[in-house]
Image (spheres, helix red, strand yellow):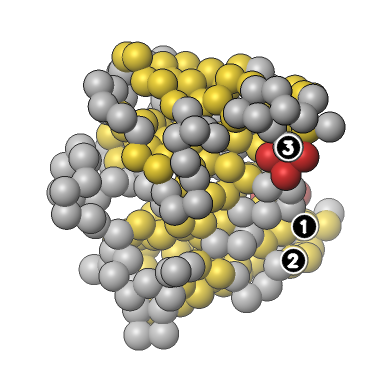
Amino acid sequence: GESVGLHLPTLSVQEGDNSIINCAYSNSASDYFIWYKQESGKGPQFIIDIRSNMDKRQGQRVTVLLNKTVKHLSLQIAATQPGDSAVYFCAENKSEPGTITNAGGTSYGKLTFGQGTILTVHP
Amino acid sequence: SAVISQKPSRDICQRGTSLTIQCQVDSQVTMMFWYRQQPGQSLTLIATANQGSEATYESGFVIDKFPISRPNLTFSTLTVSNMSPEDSSIYLCSVEVQIMNTEAFFGQGTRLTVV
């Protein structure tokens, strides 16, 4: 079936450095992508999302880049802090005709998750 | 954001028994989702639970093994039936909420160990 995967399972950086976490997806029909952060013992926490009609979106210290040509998604974290240490997951979603949704045909909660990357930030 | 509470937060169960996990949301939501996260792995969608209709299960998951209830717009349960050690996982409830944008929020999860 369709799947979303990550290139690097672990990433170690020094505090203050920029981090880049990568993700490859295989479903060309996907139209919505999200990055989640999961700390130990907690559920995934939404970081940032991007729709397929965009190639870049910026948040606070985070940027998501989408390259639909090569089906690649990345998360950039600027000035990485020890509190950023966690597992990061990309997730994808595609509109499904007939799906019960809030609006626009997209069920934002019906997600396919990637493998996950463990980010460790050293002080 | 939505506040999602799951109970229990963790449990150790004997094989062959069943466990019901509760998910309570602090606001009314149309769609609720149940995910499984096996040890050291990513999340896999089990089913979508909508109030007033049967849950929709993903490939590889069946109602007899994972019966779901959705009695109202703030509550859902997932039962893991006739458990085996292979069912040891974190089970997570998720809801779709529209604030400025539409996002999926997750509960803290229920860590299940089957012995």
In the rendered image, residue B114, in percent from the top left (x then y), is placed at 78, 32
In the rendered image, residue B20, in percent from the top left (x then y), is placed at 58, 20
Where B30 falls versus A53 (above or below)? above
Which residue is at a point 72% across and 58% down the rendered structure image? A118
Label 2 marks which chain's residue?
Answer: A
Give the CA separation, mark 3 to mark 2: 31 Å
Q: Amino acid at mark 2?
A: Thr
**Is A88 or B59 nearer to us in this picture?**
B59
Which residue is at a point 33% across and 75% down the rendered structure image? A28
Quarter containing the C terminus of chain A? bottom right
Q: Amino acid at mark 1?
A: Thr
Disc 2 on helix, strand or loop?
strand
Question: Which mark, by number, is residue A120?
Answer: 1
Residue, disc 3: B84
**Is A12 or B110 nearer to us in this picture?**
B110
Q: Are marks 1 and 2 in contact (CB under 8 Å)?
A: yes
Badge 1 or badge 2: first in the primary sequence: 2
Discs 3 and 1 lie in a common subunit: no
Q: Quadrant of residue A77?
A: bottom right
Disc 1 on helix, strand or loop?
strand
Where A34 falls versus A9 (above or below)? above
Where B43 falls versus B75 (above or below)? below
